[in-house]
Image (tube, rainbow, N blue to C red):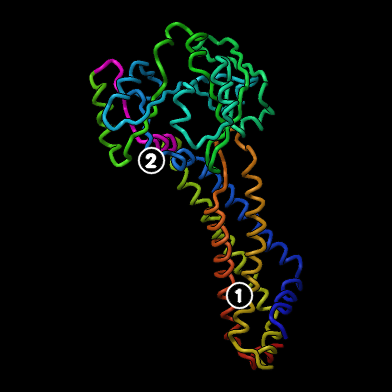
Amino acid sequence: MRFFPLLLANLVRKKVRTTLTVGSFFVALVLFALLAALRAGFNQGIDVAGADRLVVIGRTGLIQPLPFPYLERIRRLPGVKEVAHATWFGGIYQDPKNFFPQFAIDPDLWLAMYPEFLVDEAQWRDFKADRQGAMIGRKLAARFGWKVGDHVPLKSPGYLGGESWDFNVRGIYRGSRPQDDETQFWMQHRYLYEKGPAYWKGIVGWYVVRVADPEQALSVVRAIDGEFANSPSETRTQTESAFAAAFVKQMGNIEFLIMVIGSIVFFTLLLVTGNTMAIAVRERTGELAVLKAIGYSDRFVLGLVLAESVLIAAVGGGLGLLAGRGIASQDLTNGVILMYLPATAVLVGAGVALVTGLLAGLLPALSAMRLSVVNALRRV
């Protein structure tokens, strides 16, 4: 008698029960994939942060703008390789719920600071030549159906007058890594100065600094903050990863919450699957005794029961991860959180599913292995 035909025959004997157990793994792994994608989304800024990039903001936070002349003063400091600046725009497209990040940038400085963003050279030239030009991310373009050449009106926030600003889509950028943010909207900083209120001229939102040697980043941080100490616009400089982590912490301990929910789900799944396998073994007590009586070893019986449990976990878990990855790839949060499922999370999910299946079948398998042929046949 071959092992796999016997294994499949046992699984299809109770089709409804097997289907429901596979479905339990499916639902659990879909939830795991969504939680992992949510966690990756919250940590996205940390994961993509450059080791050689620093973020310079006002000492009281991002709400405090910084003077534009700081650009050259920062550039002259020892250890600084490049400097760029950005300003949050905060315009509204059609509905306030249509949130997406919008930055006013200097095109001559931006791409040198973020080489992970890939753009067509011709499109970048068109963007630089048009003061109303806009460069948008690939996911943002897909979300609203925008394409190169489209006209996009944005209503500016109240602190910029609340009027409609017109933009021309001149290019679409993409990230070189799966976790790169492809939902951003870049506009010309000179357009912000020309159309914005007079009091907005001469200031920027924050600076991004690339250091020549990441090992010397701490000394550059101290030099920047020391340069502007006791000035009307003092600065707070952080590594890009620390800056991103600070945003995540403001939302609470999301990672702990995700871990708790995931642990409860898999513990419940372990109990349900273990109980299912125990019932299946009890129902086949006589058959298992016959297998032993005709010469099959205890290890064979142990492996047979364990294989059933692991196969159920593998099928249900695999389908759940595929479905979860597909769901996570959709824009479920309207651009607020960039959900994506990393390859490491897929491997972890597969491993957890298989281990859960193994543990769930372990006690019933040991019970079947220790089954006494005489006693089992006597009950039959």
Q: The C terminus lies in which quarter of the figure?
A: bottom right
Name the N-terminal-most of marks 1 and 2: 2
Query: Label 2 near label 1: C-beta < 8 Å?
Result: no
**Left or right of 33, for residue 225:** left
Residue sitting at 45 percent across and 30 percent down? Answer: 112
Q: Which mark is residue 51?
A: 2
State the residue in front, 22 or 317: 317
Q: From the image, tell me which residue sits under label 1.
A: 306
Residue density around tag 1, few if under 14, some if 14–19, many if 20 or more, within 10 Å: many
Q: Nearer the viewer, residue 250 or 344?
A: 344
Q: Position of residue 352 (x, y in %)?
A: 54, 61
- Note whether 45 is above or below 345 in the view shown: above
- Residue 140 in the image: x percent, y percent? 61, 30
| Residue pictured at 63% horizontal, 52% vertical | 30
Q: Residue at x 55, y 43 (%)?
A: 178
Task: Please report the residue visible at 56 percent of the width from the left and 75 percent of the height from the top.
Answer: 363
Alpha-carbon span between mark 1 and mark 2: 46 Å
User: Residue 76, which numbered label?
Assistant: none
In the figure, residue 312 lies in which quadrant? bottom right
Label 2: which secondary element = loop
The amino acid at mark 1 is Leu
- Is 240 contained in the magenta span? yes
- Residue 28 is situated, as x and y percent measured from the top left of the image, at 61, 55
Q: Amino acid at mark 2?
A: Ala
Q: Nearer the viewer, mark 1 or mark 2?
A: 2
- Magenta stretch bounds: 231-248
Expressed as whole percent of the image width and height from the top left, the position of residue 320 reads 65, 55
